[in-house]
Image (cartoon, helix red, strand yellow):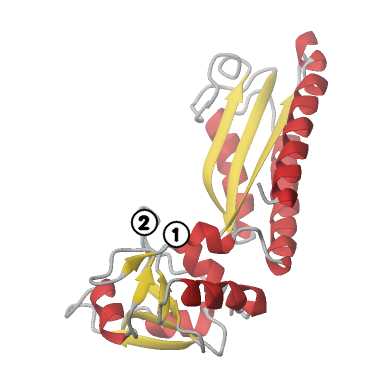
Amino acid sequence: MKNCAGPGSGRRRRLDKRLTADSLAAIWFARPNGFAWLTGGSNVVDRAGPVGVAAAGYDGDEVRVVTNTIEADRLATEELPDDVAVSSYDWHETSLAEAVAARSPTPAAADFDVPGFETVDATELRQPLTEYDVERYRKLGATTAEAVEATCREASAADTEQTVAARLRGRLAEDGIDSPVVLVGGEERAPIYRHPTPTETPIGGYALVVVTAERDGLFASCTRTVAFDLPEWLLERPRPAARVEATALAATRDVGTAGG
């Protein structure tokens, strides 16, 4: 589906400020999170790689994308806003970094290794979230929670941890959400391991289900517990744990608001 989301005025203001502060002519993003933040689209083909198949750059006037001839049409048609120009290069003749270096005004910076470019940390540009990102994040969180809770309701004591994890990944994928982290620990393993990666072990009396979900460069984590044979201690622990979490979240909000 065509992604019609552009960088928006909030993003451009931050980028303009960085260009001025660092005396740069352009900033480029090829890491998936940065690319998604700037364009609203995905440059991922191989999920194992730290850099995608395209780079998005901003020069103070416009956003443009550089990619190889294999990906150019697909990105322009399915991933990028209509006002983002796409420049392509022959994949067998050069690399993404070299193609960006040849097309960008200088001096420039990038979030991946480009000859002669400075390094930029996209984290400072992406935080705090813009109003547009806040709305997207809320939708991601709600959809993720719905998927986790539906998976828990469908589960049975005989299901293996891997089965529960596979159902959750499938539900999220149907909504265009990736799941880089899925943990499922059943009655046997949850009390022992803090990060119970799913195994063939049946979940038994209860299970802890944890996911980190990603869409459009935003990440949301969600944890739920489902119980079929509820142990007494499980009733006693949620409230103290929730109090600790609420206290930590409140402190984080205070620091963020105060700019600490």
Number of callouts? 2
Q: Amino acid at mark 1?
A: Asp
The residue shown at (57%, 83%) is: 81
* In the image, farthest residue toward the top: 232
Asked if residue 230 lies left or right of residue 155, the reply is right
Closer to the camera in the image, 123 or 168: 123
Examine the rendered structure and indicate whether residue 51 appears above or below residue 58.
above
Neighbour tally class for label 2: few under 14, some 14-19, many 20 plus, Cα within 10 Å: few
The residue shown at (36%, 62%) is: 51
Asked if residue 75 lies left or right of residue 82, the reply is left
Asked if residue 5 lies left or right of residue 27, the reply is right
Examine the rendered structure and indicate whether residue 24 appears above or below residue 251.
below
Of the numbered discs in the image, which one, if any, rests on residue 121? 1
Q: Quadrant of the N terminus?
A: bottom right
Residue holding disc 2: 50
Neighbour tally class for label 1: few under 14, some 14-19, many 20 plus, Cα within 10 Å: few
The residue shown at (39%, 83%) is: 72
